[in-house]
Image (tube, rainbow, N blue to C red):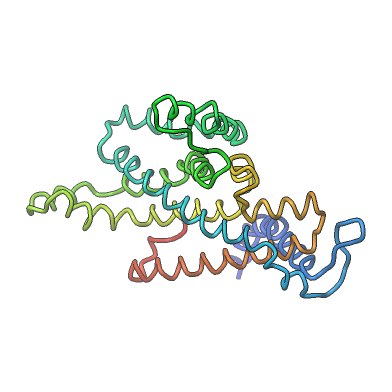
Amino acid sequence: MRSRYRTALFLLPAGAWFFAMLVLPLVVVFVFSFGERGPAGGYVPAFTFDNFLNLGARWAAFKNTMIMAPLGTLACLLIAYPLAYFLAVRASPTWRTLLLILVIVPFWTSILIRSYAWIYLLGGQGLPSLLEALGLGNPRLINTPFAVLVGIVYGYLPLMVFPIFVSLERLDKRLLEAASDLGAPPMNTFLTVTLPLSMPGVATGCMLVFILLMGEFLIPAMLGGGKVFFIGNALVDLFLQSRNWAFGSAVAVALVLVMVITVTVYMHLTRRWSGGRDDVSLM
């Protein structure tokens, strides 16, 4: 009994922080979602389902998010895995440290500054001008889904690299040597040994990037020019511009439900893939 009290005492600060910073805001948003917009904006207490019935008005934001978030996650994975593999398996310790620092460097500056840089690179004076000079036409790159995808990959790539890198670095190299000694071709070794053992890092990186992309608003706003609208942009508009807190809360609740369903399906599929092992998880 004394041990239980001691454990509860140690968990009390973290539990109180978790309750105050996560649970209470979610409760407030949930309550607001059943209210109404006041005459001057904000929130008026009520109990109505009209906000949820009107979610179709923001269908474009939901659709763009549900398309671009998985697509951005896949793009990050396709670029991050070869890089992480090279860093963990092929690079020497000296080059590995240097390259890891280069991967971290983008986090040293604000995402706002980096997005402005991509506005210039993808705008009329950047890459389109270079393509025109090479006789390849003058395509419109800025304010398109392509520009948003480029910003997503640039901004979220490190979050995909590091979990995969950790999984590959912990890989027992003797397994690769054994496969080679038994005559397995390099591709077969990769598909049957390296890739399955690195799946925990792949799953963690995918969920980190996907969850954050579901709430992203800055990259679509700056590189999409208002033409590629995410749920995050809809929430900014509803809370800060339209001041329709009730409807914005309903959209936020719907987003949370989508994320809960996504994470639940992910956990089920991951556990099924791992055969019930506990070493494959979100974090």
47 in relation to 217, above or below: below
Of residue 267 and residue 169, the one placed in the foreground of this image is 267
Q: Position of residue 267 (x, y in %)?
A: 45, 67
Q: Is residue 128 above or below residue 82?
A: above
Residue at x 63% of width, y 52% of height:
229
Q: Is residue 109 left or right of residue 81?
A: right
- The residue lying at 40 percent from left, 33 percent from top is 100
The image position of residue 33, as x and y in percent, is 76, 67
Residue at 61%, 68% in the rendered image: 257
Quadrant assignment, res 144: top right
The image shows a total of numbered marks equal to 0
Classify the position of the N terminus by image quarter.
Answer: bottom right
For the residue pair 53 and 35, the one nearer the viewer reads as: 53
x and y, in percent, of residue 19 in the image: 70, 60
* Furthest residue toward right: 39
* Quadrant of res 60: bottom right
Q: Nearer the viewer, residue 93 or 264?
A: 264
Left or right of 274 on screen, residue 139: right
Q: Position of residue 177 (x, y in %)?
A: 14, 47
Q: Quadrant of residue 219?
A: top right
